Image: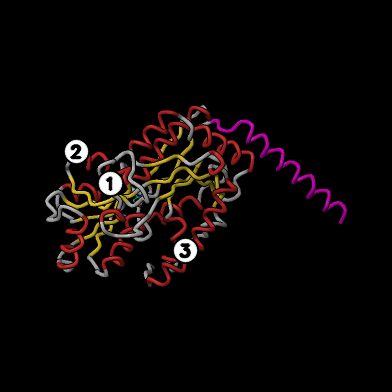
């Protein structure tokens, strides 16, 4: 009995020592960040800017692997199969909190299977349409969309994506259902919007600011309580005719559960430094997004935020009766 206890003690000391040694050398090679949406879209953009800024502190390259589909749940499931050694990380948005209510058969636990590293940003969304959409402002959009609801297509990035959540809010505010077209991300959805193959979508400004400024798509409002500096001429949805229509999209970084704490701490520190980087802050601002304050880019703050968001969205989604298998 005593011998067994000693062996266990020795074993945990050796393992503890190994994980400390691992953390001291960490990182010694390239880190991969899984992004669960298509390349070139909003989550990809946020992840690439963050990875670039973190690489300065970590002195290694952080590359993005886009594993898209099913509103981000395929990429999330992939992370849970990765080795918890700090070399595979994950950046996802609010959809990580809504997935448990939306997916009946979610193959992972968004809290238990992930080691939080920290929050990254809060970003605006904007209601946009193909350039020739026959409405000059939100009031006209509302009237036209309701009158033509059977003919109109609403693009999104799959169930649980931010564009899906915003689209659900829109349908509920208009009391109208549209045919929804799911894509692997809003980058490919934007291509079809530019080509006029889909009619409209509610998408993060990270993905549509340049197209709005270039006059290549129509815009009806931003989803923040106040106008955003990146698009000062665009009214808020509330201002333009849909009171209290506010959605903001947060992204966060995770590692697989079981990743040694010293590695998580190193990553969180590097994230906090990255979010103060002048280039990152400027690019975020140009895209209508804001880096979180340092005290939110921590494992504790993300853990609490994720839980609060799961608790907030669960009942809303259950009431709306939307599910995916
Ligand atoms: N974040 C998704 C993307 O990067 C879009 C969305 O969630 O609506 O494509």
Give the residue at x 61% y 39%.
265
Question: Is 139 or 28 nearer to us in this picture?
Answer: 139
Q: Which numbered marker is on residue 80?
A: none
- Label 3 lies in ligand 1 vicinity (Cβ under 8 Å): no
Residue at disc 1, secondary structure: helix
Q: How far apart are marks 3 and 1 (CA)?
A: 25 Å
Q: Name the residue under label 3.
A: 100
Task: Please tell me whether the stretch drawn in magenta is mainly helix, strand or loop.
Answer: helix
Give the residue at x 20% y 52%.
129
Q: Name the residue under label 1.
A: 187
Residue 24 in the magenta stretch? The answer is yes
Q: How far apart are marks 3 and 2 (CA)?
A: 38 Å
User: In the rendered view of the protein, which quadrant contains the C terminus?
Assistant: bottom left
Tag 1 or tag 3, which sits nearer the N-term? Answer: 3
Mark whose residue sits in front, 3 or 2: 2
Mark whose residue sits in front, 2 or 1: 2
Bounds of the magenta segment: 1-28
Residue 65 x %, y %: 40, 42
Residue 14 x %, y %: 74, 41
Q: Which numbered marker is on residue 214?
A: 2
Q: How far apart are marks 2 and 1 (CA)?
A: 16 Å
């Amino acid at each position: 009995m005593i011998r067994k206890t000693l062996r266990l003690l020795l074993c945990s000391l050796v393992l503890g020592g190994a994980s400390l040694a691992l953390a001291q050398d960490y990182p010694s090679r390239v880190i991969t960040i899984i992004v669960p949406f298509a390349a070139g879209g909003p989550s990809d953009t946020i992840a690439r800017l963050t990875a670039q800024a973190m690489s300065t502190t970590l002195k290694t390259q952080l590359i993005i692997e886009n594993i898209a589909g099913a509103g981000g749940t395929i990429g999330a499931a992939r992370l849970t199969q990765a080795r918890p050694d700090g070399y595979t990380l994950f950046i996802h948005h609010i959809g990580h909190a809504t997935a448990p209510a939306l997916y009946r058969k979610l193959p992972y636990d968004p809290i238990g299977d992930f080691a939080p590293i920290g929050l990254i940003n809060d970003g605006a969304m904007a209601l946009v349409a193909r350039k020739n959409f026959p409405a000059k402002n939100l009031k006209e959009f509302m009237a036209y969309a309701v009158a033509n609801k059977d003919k109109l297509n609403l693009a999104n990035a799959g169930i649980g994506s931010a564009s899906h959540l915003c689209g659900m809010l829109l349908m509920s505010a208009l009391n109208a259902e549209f045919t929804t077209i799911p894509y692997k991300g809003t980058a490919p959805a934007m291509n079809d919007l530019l080509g006029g193959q889909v009619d409209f979508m509610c998408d993060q400004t990270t993905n549509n600011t340049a197209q709005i400024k270039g006059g290549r798509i129509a815009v009806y409002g931003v989803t923040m309580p106040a106008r955003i500096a990146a698009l000062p001429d665009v009214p808020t949805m509330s201002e333009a005719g849909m009171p209290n229509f506010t959605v903001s999209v947060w992204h966060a970084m995770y590692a697989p559960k079981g990743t040694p704490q010293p590695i998580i701490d190193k990553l969180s520190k590097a994230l906090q430094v990255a979010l103060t980087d002048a280039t990152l802050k400027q690019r975020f601002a140009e895209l209508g997004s804001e880096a979180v304050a340092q005290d939110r880019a921590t494992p504790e703050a993300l853990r609490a935020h994720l839980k609060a968001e799961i608790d907030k969205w669960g009942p809303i989604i259950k009431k709306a009766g939307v599910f995916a298998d």
